[in-house]
Amino acid sequence: MLEFRDAVDGDLPALLALYAQLEQEPDVSMDLAAARALWERIRDRPDYRIVVAESPSDGIVGAYSLQIVQGLAHAGTPSAIVEDVVVDSRYRRRGIGRKMMENAIAHARVQGCYKLALSSNRRREAAHRFYEALGFERHGYSFAVFLKRD
């Protein structure tokens, strides 16, 4: 049994532990005090959600963030962006990631979004196969200007 809900203040330690599993480089994780300060700003944004996947017996086993983006293009139809998708390494390959993405897609549909987009590091070929198996299509190119490098 897996339940989805919006993250709350008390989830920050578990979220930081999950996000540390995503980091490719050491020493880029956020400490709890910094996370709490940022959380104060994030939780009041109505179009931005951090969603946790919770097992009644094991607690938080995964998370993702979802942002609904309004714009004037596409006749004002919103789009959605999913980021920071992570399943605890102890619980991978159990269908949790699939259920999380199905949950994100369902929420985007309810919000009337015309698409749900995500980006994935080029090296994460297994993740690419996972997203394609869920119906995501390679679409265009993703470009980035990295404004801060540690």
Image: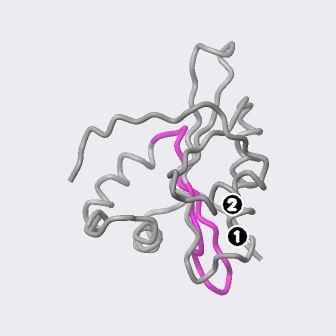
Name the residue at 53% across, 61% down: 7
Left or right placement of residue 65 versus residue 39 in this view: right
Q: Is residue 127 shown above or below 118?
A: below
Q: Is residue 107 shown above or below 126?
A: above
In front here: 76 or 83?
83
Helix, strand or loop under label 1: helix
Q: Which mark is residue 40?
A: none
Helix, strand or loop under label 2: helix
Q: Is residue 90 shown above or below 9?
A: below
Q: Which mark is residue 100?
A: 2
Left or right placement of residue 121 versus residue 104 in this view: left
Q: Residue furthest bottom?
A: 57
The image quadrant of residue 80 is top right
Which residue range is magenta in the image?
Answer: 45-64
Name the residue at 51% across, 57% down: 123
Q: Amino acid at mark 1?
A: Ile
Within 10 angstroms of label 2, few (less than 14), some, or many (20 or more) residues? many
Name the residue at 68% across, 22% down: 77
Q: Are marks 1 and 2 in contact (CB under 8 Å)?
A: yes
Q: Is residue 8 shown above or below 121?
A: below
Reply yes or no: does residue 52 show up in magenta: yes
Q: Amino acid at mark 2?
A: Met
Within 10 angstroms of label 1, few (less than 14), some, or many (20 or more) residues? many
* Number of numbered markers: 2
Q: Which residue is mark 1?
A: 96
Q: Name the spot of residue 103 as percent of width and height, x first.
A: 73, 54
Q: CA distance from mark 1 to mark 2?
A: 6 Å
Quadrant where the image shows the N terminus = bottom right
Reply yes or no: does residue 8 show up in magenta: no
Q: Name the spot of residue 97 as percent of width and height, x first.
A: 68, 65
Q: Name the spot of residue 84 as percent of width and height, x first.
A: 51, 55
Q: Name the spot of residue 2 as percent of width and height, x first.
A: 73, 72
